[in-house]
Image: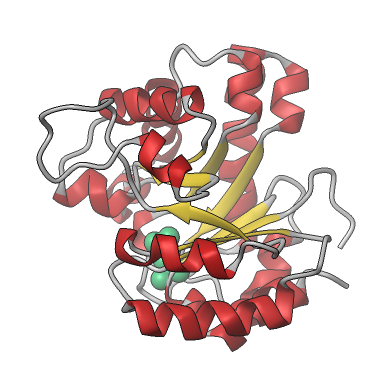
Amino acid sequence: MNKERKLIIAGNWKMNKTVAEATDLVEALDRDLGTQTDVDVVVCPPFTALDTVSAKLKNSLIKVGAQNMSENDYGAFTGEINAGMLRDLRVHYVILGHSERREYQKESDALINAKTKAALTAGLKPIVCVGETLAQREANETESVVGQQIAGSLAGLDAEQLKDTVIAYEPVWAIGTGKTASSEQAQEVHAFIRSEINKSHGEEVAKAVRIQYGGSVKPANAEELLGQPDVDGALVGGASLEARSFSDIINNTRN
Ligand code: PGA
């Protein structure tokens, strides 16, 4: 696939996989994908499997991401994990502001912005998630909702920081539902996000920043979605839990 930006495909394992299961999955992925250079591949296991997965991928081109982190440094924050601790486990990416956290943990754009800045300061690349609900789409609010999430979550980032940030557009109605946005719907919102970045940070940054699509991405629809000019990769949930389907998604975009 001939793309303006290098594709980045990340697997969000969510709250799945014991250490033993994670080991099996990542060994299989490393066999299938560990030496390819066409696509940046990232796996995001639960915290409990990060150390093992990082060790398994030590000599692999597959990178490791976390699914969340604290906006704070060290101290009295029971149950939290900071960016430095993730770096210590050779983690390179962190998913921030996933819609499940926005909904269940009530994460706000301001909090996601603080986490994004903390991640970048520590040398982690954030994958910042945005996306509208079905009710918002039906009320024609997609652009205002996504525009606000982009402005709020990425506020105050300079050009270099934004280039190190990956944006994931994940329409909430498409996550885990089997309903995928059509490639036209995805392209439309991705182009909108890029135009917002063009307005805030200029053309060079807008051209460089990678925008993933997420929401029921599978081997059967990946090629068409990722073939859109402003779709620069995918954030994959369910289909990243099996080596075969995750590898197929990546391999389907490599020809
Ligand atoms: P899904 O999840 O691929 O299972 O829809 C995507 C996500 O939540 O990142």
Q: Residue 38: image x %, image y %?
A: 83, 61
From the viewer's perspective, tell me whether residue 140 is left or right of residue 1.
left
In this rendering, the answer to whether 198 lies above or below 102 is above
Which quadrant holds the C terminus?
A: bottom right
Which quadrant holds the N terminus?
A: bottom right
Q: Nearer the viewer, residue 52 or 120?
A: 52
Q: How is the image coloured?
A: secondary structure
Q: Nearer the viewer, residue 10 or 178?
A: 10
From the viewer's perspective, tell me whether residue 62 is left or right of residue 217.
right
Residue at image location 79% in from the left, 69% down from the top: 35
Q: Residue 56: image x %, image y %?
A: 56, 70
Q: Nearer the viewer, residue 24 or 158?
A: 24
Q: Residue 119: image x %, image y %?
A: 44, 31
From the viewer's perspective, tell me whether residue 202 is left or right of residue 136.
right
Query: Quarter of the picture for ligand 1?
Result: bottom left
* One can see residue 139 in this view: yes
Residue at image location 83% in from the left, 70% down from the top: 254
From the viewer's perspective, tell me whether residue 118 is left or right of residue 41.
left
Residue at image location 29% in from the left, 28% down from the top: 71
* One can see residue 128 in this view: no
